[in-house]
Image (cartoon, rainbow, N blue to C red):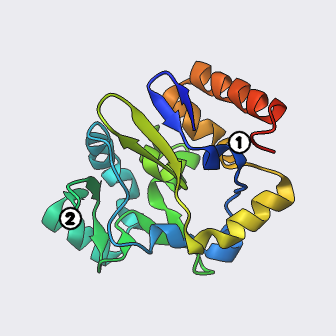
Amino acid sequence: MIQIDDVIVSLDVLDQYFCCNLSACHGECCIEGDAGAPVELDEVAELENVLNVVWDDLSLEARTVINKQGVVYTDSDGDLVTSIVNNKDCVFTCYDEKGNCFCAIEKAYRAGKTKFYKPISCQLYPIRVKDFGNFKGVNYHHWDVCKAAVLLGKKLNLRVYQFLKEPLIRKFGQAWYDELEDCVKELKDKKVIE
């Protein structure tokens, strides 16, 4: 592990390969799991504000869930997460003609309809950030549905932290990321990681 400011980063984030391969997984990370995506408190208003932009892209079932319980709920672990449909799909999922799952918020962002990209936990996946009060832990979440992403990352020689450069900068800032890259270089020089 390395520490930058109050953030402790697992070595898996630095030495494991990863690059999302939507054509292989079809966006399964937005569908599978036992709860919605983690949401930071300040993101709830953003999710509510973007509803009018993405509403038509959401399924009827998702709209019903949102009307009934809102865009988020507290899961069994006490974490704030996006609402889900039938204990499965995030309410913000939408599908293309090939059955690939997409985030309706990200779709609207890419079309220039909103300035909110999507919850940071979604953009950071497969990294999970846990707040421990005095420090934050940054870990790589290994999941079978991402096997194709690991293979593609190996093929492209792309590590988790490199693939997630933009969201890591969004979360922790450019100076933090620059220091992370310096730490990686030092770890490589010392042969701690490849």
Q: Position of residue 70 (x, y in %)?
A: 19, 58
- For the point 73% across and 48% down, the residue is 159
Q: Amino acid at mark 1?
A: Gln
Q: Identify residue for label 2.
A: 76
Q: Identify residue for label 1.
A: 162
Q: Is residue 187 above or below residue 19?
A: above
Q: Amino acid at mark 2?
A: Ser
Q: Position of residue 110 (x, y in %)?
A: 58, 48
Can residue 152 be seen in the rendering of this structure? Answer: yes
Q: Is residue 85 above or below residue 156?
A: below
- For the point 56% across and 44% down, the residue is 10
- For the point 32% across and 28% down, the residue is 134
Question: In the rendered structure, are the residues bearing label 2 and label 1 in contact, judged by CB atoms less than 8 Å apart?
Answer: no
- For the point 56% across and 39% down, the residue is 167
Q: Nearer the viewer, residue 110 or 17?
A: 17
Determine crowd level at label 1: few under 14, some 14-19, many 20+ residues with C-alpha closer than 10 A.
some
Instruction: Quarter of the image for the C terminus: give it.
Output: top right
Residue 90 sits in quarter? bottom left
The residues tagged by marks 2 and 1 sit, at their Cα atoms, a distance apart of: 32 Å
Q: Which mark is residue 62?
A: none
Can residue 171 be seen in the rendering of this structure? Answer: no
Q: Is residue 100 left or right of residue 93?
A: right
Q: Nearer the viewer, residue 15 or 170?
A: 15
- SS state under label 1: helix
Instruction: Quarter of the image for the N terminus: give it.
Output: top right
Q: Nearer the viewer, residue 171 or 2?
A: 2
- SS state under label 2: loop
